[in-house]
Image (tube, rainbow, N blue to C red):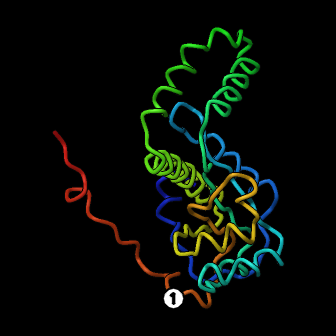
Amino acid sequence: MKLLDALEWRYAVKKMNGSKIPADKLNTIIEATRLAPSAFGLTPYSIIVIEDEETRKKLQPAFYNQSQIVDGSAVIVFAAWNNVSEKEVAEYMQDIAEQRGVPVESLNEFAGYINGSLKNLTADQAKIWADKQTYIALGFGLVAAAAEQIDATPMEGFVPASVDEVLGLSALGLHSVVALTLGYRDAANDYLVNAKKVRRAHHKLVIKK
């Protein structure tokens, strides 16, 4: 399926049929989110993949009992770091050095630039900055799911504190930001299954200068 055809095919599925996603397709979607761009390449978040049925049942009330949480095959929660310090930057520099085969000392200027940029942010600004990065990964996950013909529903409608509690995110230095349910559409019961996709027309959306 060509990319635009896949994006035309996808929609925010409201009812899923409970069928499991093949492991290779799920792994492809997860890997696509890992490869998403991020400011400085730092990726100040973790991707929590929940396939366990009991855990998804515990999460469902936090998502206002939306059925996709339990009727889908997996829920991905994008959880941003609570703090971004020089420690995390140093660990990232070490990863770069190891994977590119360069001395970590050669990255001192880059590390200093990142640390300097982050120090200019207030705590609230740093949180917003980290949270925004998760949406880029979410977008890559949505496109990858469409390419694999896996249905996906992005979700902001949940109680973050409750999700954090169920998943034990505070102890990991994380907080939930946005989620993605993956599965297969229930064509017999989803009222949107045959609805035409409606987006603003190209001439209304795109401004050329």
Q: Which residue is nearer to you in this view: 66 or 206?
A: 66
**Residue 50, position as x, y percentages in the image:** 77, 65
> Residue 41 is drawn in which quadrant?
top right
Q: Residue furthest bottom?
A: 189
Side (left or right) of 170 relative to 146: right
Give whichever of 120, 49 is nearer the camera: 120
Q: Amino acid at mark 1?
A: Tyr
Identify the secondary structure beneath mark 1.
loop
The number of numbered discs placed on residues in the rendered structure image is: 1
Q: Name which quarter of the figure residue 83 lies in.
A: top right
Q: In the picture shown, does residue 171 fall above or below 119? A: below
Reply above or below: 125 against 61. Answer: above
Is residue 53 shown left or right of residue 88?
right
List the residue tagged with mark 1: 191
- What residue is rendered at 72% in x and 25% in y? 95
Q: Position of residue 187 (x, y in %)?
A: 61, 84
Residue 152, image quadrant: bottom right
Residue 127 left/right relative to 54: left
Q: Please report the residue visible at 62 percent of the width from the left and 57 percent of the height from the top.
A: 78
Relative image position of residue 29 (x, y in whole percent): 68, 53
Q: Is residue 2 visible?
A: no
The C terminus: image quadrant? top left
Q: Quarter of the image containing the N terminus?
A: bottom right
Does residue 114 appear in this view?
A: yes
Q: Could you say where residue 59 lies in the image, as x and y percent from the top left?
A: 71, 77
Give the class, few, some or many, for how many residues have Cα within 10 Å of label 1's Cα (few <14, many ≥20). few
